[in-house]
Image (tube, rainbow, N blue to C red):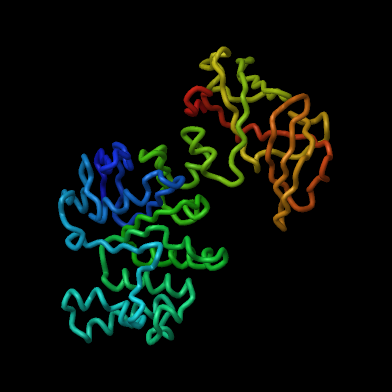
Amino acid sequence: MPIALEQVTKIFANGRVAVRDLTLEIADGELLVLVGPSGCGKSTVLRLIAGLETPTSGRIVIDGRDMTGVPPNERDLAMVFQSYALYPHKTVADNLGFGLRMRGVDRAAIASRVGAVAAALQIEPLLDLKPAQLSGGQRQRVALGRAIVREPRAFLLDEPLSNLDPQLRVDTRAELSQLHRRLRATMIHVTHDQEEAMTLGDRIAVLRDGAAEQVAPPLEMYQRPRNTFVATFVGSPKMNLFDVTAVARGRGLTISGSGFSIESEMEALSGSIDPRVPLLLGVRARDVDLVKQGYGDAIAQVTLIEPLGHEAIVRAGITSGGPDITIVVNADEVPGSGETIGLKFRRDRLHLFRADDGTSVT
């Protein structure tokens, strides 16, 4: 079921603008992830689609029909909340079938659908238990199951994994991805976790202050961020940004910053860069290689090492008064604290942004 928001704005009574002129199109069967910092409007967007909030202006279109003023129970959507919202006094089976009973579905049909969903989510042994007897992961499966058993045409997921411990979160994330492939239903998933967004979404919408900064498939979002906000929000560790100037040199650019200079083959930009315009050079931590001193683009001194097992995050200060930089190295390449290292930036992975408004020029 396709869902569209057309120039939607939501202003609360206290004057706070939660959503600002937002236009989004979610295709039938797509899993779109809404991601962004706290307070950016993600959950409000979900509540607007569900009908739990009414837009101040704009339209909510579901399956080609304007549903802006239609009550939630007539939208054929299922919402899964962060808090699970299970009835504590009811068994798992009763929680799963509650919505169907309220719709007057007969007992045999309820039992059949509850059994099928419980089998799919591997919660059949839990059907006679109460929510208090379940782990967080089990409660989350029940909350998902309660939504699935209704057989809605779209699912709205409001940070459903945020209460789980890290390993369970990874496992449940994989189950949710498999569930989407199996159901092929439209899903809109809200999270503040950019790693979760990257692994789950067919596309990601990065929100800031109620507006969409970029909407794109995960890999495109990572490789071609539209601005510095997206560049530093998507990807971990966040992208390094350095103040630079760029001057055309033959078929490429000479990019100069404090403590380093790079000859880049950005031929397409060489004729359009104004050397008087301040720029930001973006380099991801995994796009910097360790090299012998004198063979790279910069020399830096290690200030902090964060081991992660198979790899490590290394923080260093570029010498000659240069900026700090974060890089990721393999476990067998980890330098010592205080060691001086050579750095080389991968030329095909460089990003340039305008320093005034943060927009990409690459």
Specify whether 61 is left or right of 308: left
Q: Position of residue 324 (x, y in %)?
A: 69, 34
Q: Image check: 300 left or right of 31?
A: right
How many numbered marks appear?
0
Q: Quadrant of the N terminus?
A: bottom left
Residue at 27% across, 41% down: 11
Residue depicted at 32% across the width and 72% down the height: 146
Asked if 311 appears above or below 293 in the picture, the reply is: below
Is 289 rendered above or below residue 70?
above
> Looking at this view, is 54 or 79 the one in front?
54
User: In the picture provided, is 258 more to the left or to the right than 335?
Assistant: left
Q: Residue furthest front?
A: 14
**Residue 280 screen position, x and y as percent:** 58, 26
Can see residue 1?
A: no
Looking at the picture, tell me which residue is in the foreground, 147 or 270: 147
The answer to whether 295 is drawn above or below residue 62 in the figure is above
Q: Quadrant of residue 261?
A: top right
Specify whether residue 83 is in view: yes
- From the top left corner, tell me how far across and down residue 314 is, in percent: 72, 44
Q: Is residue 209 left or right of residue 27?
A: right
Q: Nearer the viewer, residue 354 or 287?
A: 354
Kindly indicate the quadrant of the structure image that contains residue 232.
top right
Q: Residue at x 35, y 68 (%)?
A: 85
Q: Position of residue 298 (x, y in %)?
A: 75, 29
